[in-house]
Image (cartoon, helix red, strand yellow):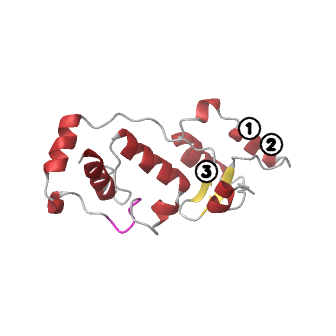
Amino acid sequence: MGLAMKAAGTPYHPTSADWREAFDMLCGHCAAQPRCEIVESMIELKSGGQWPGGGWVHNAGAGVTCLSYEARPATPMPRQQRRAMCRQKEAELPPVCDGCAARKGTDASVSLHTQRDYQAAVRNRSPFVCHQDPEGKRLCGGWCRAIRQREA
């Protein structure tokens, strides 16, 4: 068992009832999905095949994740907007919520695919929204602070 496997959890064997939800949550957001062979291997697993290396695993933060998950590329925030955000006072930035991907120990911080999304958003300076915003519009407070640090 490799290091990534130990960190993420044990092999996940989806039931028929949770197959669609797991597929939508994992593959529906993955950049590798069009060229990925994991789905075929997971389908074979349903018929008694072996668990595919790099496949779906139990994950503390997400319930289930895929070891082969790749964040989708997103459009970077325009430079003018980033500069304006960096000029804001700390108190004017969105708060870092209790479940923030940037806060160690949260479900989002231990979810492999959420961390890959978050890290790609920081690296590419593409907006990352707060997981606790029901409308999905408010920028993540942890992401804002990470971008400010990168821009400094």
CA separation in Å, label 1 and label 2:
6 Å
Residue linked to disc 2: 44
Residue range in magenta is 97-101
Image location of residue 126, percent across then percent down: 34, 40
Q: Is residue 38 magenta?
A: no
Vertical placement of 142 versus 104: above or below?
A: above
The label shown at residue 147 is: none
Q: Are marks 2 and 3 in contact (CB under 8 Å)?
A: no
Task: Name the element at disc 1.
Answer: helix
Binning the other alpha carbons within 10 Å of mark 1 as few (below 14), some (14 to 19) or many (20 upward) gives few
Q: Amino acid at mark 3?
A: Ala
Q: Amino acid at mark 1?
A: Glu
- Dot 2 or dot 3, earlier in sequence: 3
Q: Are marks 1 and 2 in contact (CB under 8 Å)?
A: yes
Residue linked to disc 3: 22
Image quarter of the N terminus? bottom right
Image location of residue 63, percent across then percent down: 59, 61
CA separation in Å, label 2 and label 3:
16 Å
Residue linked to disc 1: 40
Residue 148 vs residue 37, the one in the foreground: 148
View extreme (right): residue: 48
- The mark total stands at 3
Residue at the image position 64 percent from the left and 30 percent from the top: 35
